[in-house]
Image (spheres, rainbow, N blue to C red):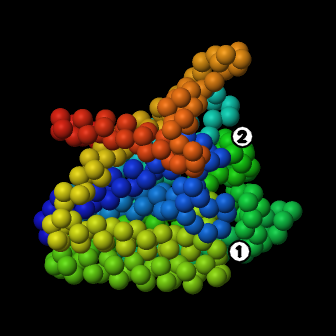
Amino acid sequence: MKNERLVSLDAFRGFTVAGMILVNSPGSWTQAYPQLLHAQWNGWTFTDWIFPFFLFIVGVSMTYSMAHRVERGDSRVALFKQVARRAAIIFLLGFILNIVPRFNFETVRIPGVLQRIAICYALGALIMLNFKPRAQAIWIVSLLLVYMALMYLVPVPGLGAGFMEPGKNLAAYIDSLFLTGHMWVQSKTWDPEGILSTIPAIATTLFGSLTGYLLRSEQTRSEKAAWMLFAGFVCLLVGGVWDWYMPINKSLWTSSYAVFMAGWALLVFGSFYWIIDVQGWQKWAKFFVVYGMNALASYFLSVMVMKLIIFFTVTGADGKAIAWKTVVYNSLFVPFFSNPLNTSLAFALAYNLVFWTIAYLLYRKQIFIKI
């Protein structure tokens, strides 16, 4: 069928970007509402929605934009060359965020959010371009079961098999073999966007890919919305049951987490689709659409600016260096809120509004930064 512009997909992408900036930018990491922080280990919060939503959207967009080109006979080789170029640029942007502003190549973190998106996009597209939807579903199941088997059955030297504790599991061991000195600074011994846990993250992308096929089908919009909501509830049920055997865990991107979060993505996106594209209620979504039309640029800029305002300092009255962010936070937010949790949230909301305003100016001028 002919592709139609989905306002709901732009809005869902924008919702996810707004959520990412919100949870990435508290005024104080020690004073933040629990739902705006990742679960300490097992379990999930609102914050744990965000990254899998990004990968799900990548899958939807990938299929929605490329499937018709495959159907009309475009070369798969040419399409994948385009995918590889985009993936390389996204990976490079992620590396830039890691290396700036210190430019210390000896300890720079190699994995990251954009790096994982790039890898999942490239491998997900490779599967999507070479396998039909039913085979892609088999890929999803296979990736999740293989990852679970590896985590529980392959022994870690000096530890054994089946351990799922922070830094004490097969994924952490693989990271230590290949990424030592180049991992997440908070842990140093494992990385939440590490090597092995990328396997189930690819499955998350393929959940989005299958949703893209549904959106391109000949079913009515109401039927598509119903199927998304139904599939979402099924994935929540399956992920919840799987949690009994392999805990829902974002840092390890466990198989139960991948299915459970695909369920939430289907429910949230399905709701957006029904409200915006089926019922035609679009005005309320303008805020998110503005973000969604320049999602990558908004995310990249927000992270870069945050790194810079933390890195650069001024000298306080006591002669000590104070980060620009701390100066702004203490001067413009702390005096106006009695609850430190609300103070931290107010900073995150204001920071979000700054980048939404930039995205809105680009939107007004019809400037959409794509790669």
| Amino acid at circle 2 | Gly
Image quadrant assignment for residue 105:
top right
| Amino acid at circle 1 | Tyr
Q: Quadrant of the C terminus?
A: top left
Q: Quadrant of the N terminus?
A: bottom left
Image quadrant assignment for residue 55:
bottom left
Q: Which mark is residue 338?
A: none
Drawn side of residue 166 relative to residue 84, left or right: right
Residue at mark 1? 152
Image quadrant assignment for residue 180:
top right
x 22%, y 40%: residue: 363
x 31%, y 47%: residue: 291
In the image, residue 215 lies at what x, y percent? 24, 71
x 77%, y 61%: residue: 168
Q: Nearer the viewer, residue 259 or 35?
A: 35
Q: Secondary structure at mark 1?
A: helix
Drawn side of residue 44 relative to residue 183, left or right: left
Q: Nearer the viewer, residue 321 or 204?
A: 321
